[in-house]
Image: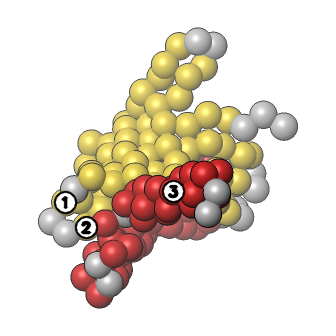
Amino acid sequence: MSMKKLLVAVLLLCTFMVAAEAQPECAQQGTACDMMMTQHASKVDAVLQAVELYAEAGRQASRDIGREAFADGATMSWVENGAITTVPISSLYDVLEQTGVEEVTYKVEDVSMAGNVAFVRISSWFSKLGAFNDMFTLAEENGKWKIVSKIYSIKKP
């Protein structure tokens, strides 16, 4: 075997070994990993239930549904003319009730979790209010995920 072929073979072998080690630990553990992934997916689903309640509150213009999604003391924030505004989440309920029933859709853009806290970013569209970038921080309270804060920006057309 020529030196060049030997060098290529060694490089390929090293590349495969590094790639195998770079695989997540989970990929090498089988059933235990499958269980961890299932548990994680279940937690993500639980977090996203709060986001769905937020959307449903918009669809039905319902303060009561909104209260299911948000923690007591939750806030809503945005930036307007360079200034940050933060208000109690009840201000959102007021807007939803004034706007009335409307179509609401959203796309989950990002979910990040660490223990009993989470972050979710969505792109949302309200038929009467417009399109938004919504970001939520959530916490798990007594086994149920609640939105602690919502910050948003209006999507520009």
Considering only vertical position in the picture, is 121 above or below 106?
A: above
Please name the amino acid that badge 3 sits on.
Val
Helix or strand or loop: what does disc 1 sit on?
strand
- When the figure is inspected, residue 57 is found, relative to residue 70, above or below; the finding is below
Residue 54 percent location from the top left of the image? 49, 59
Whether residue 108 sits left or right of residue 21 in the image: it is right
Which residue shows up at 67% across the image and 63% down it?
Answer: 105
Tell me the element at label 2: strand
Residue contact at pointers 2 and 3, CB within 8 angstroms: no
**Is the residue 6 above or below the residue 81 in the image?**
below
Tell which residue pokes out farthest to the right in this image: 157
Task: Say what amino acid the circle numbered 2 marks.
Answer: Lys
Measure the C-alpha gap from mark 3 to mark 1: 54 Å
The residue singled out by tag 2 in the image is 144
Q: Quadrant of the C terminus?
A: top right
Nearer to me, 38 or 144: 38
Residue matched to label 1: 141
Marks 3/1 in contact by CB < 8 Å: the verdict is no
Residue farthest toward the top in the current orientation of the protein: 82
The answer to which of marks 3 and 1 sits earlier in the sequence is 3
* Tag in front: 3 or 1: 3
Label 1–label 2 contact, CB within 8 A? yes
Q: Which mark is residue 95?
A: none
Per the rendering, the mark at residue 10 is 3
How many residues crowd around disc 3 within 10 Å: few (fewer than 14), some, or many (20 or more)? few
Number of numbered tags placed on the structure image: 3
In the rendered image, the vertical position of residue 108 relative to residue 90, given as above or below: below
Residue farthest left in this picture: 142
Q: Residue at x 25, y 82 (%)?
A: 32
Dot 1, how many residues are within 10 Å of its Cα: few (below 14), some (14-19), or many (20+)? few
Amino acid, disc 1: Glu
Q: Is residue 11 visible?
A: yes
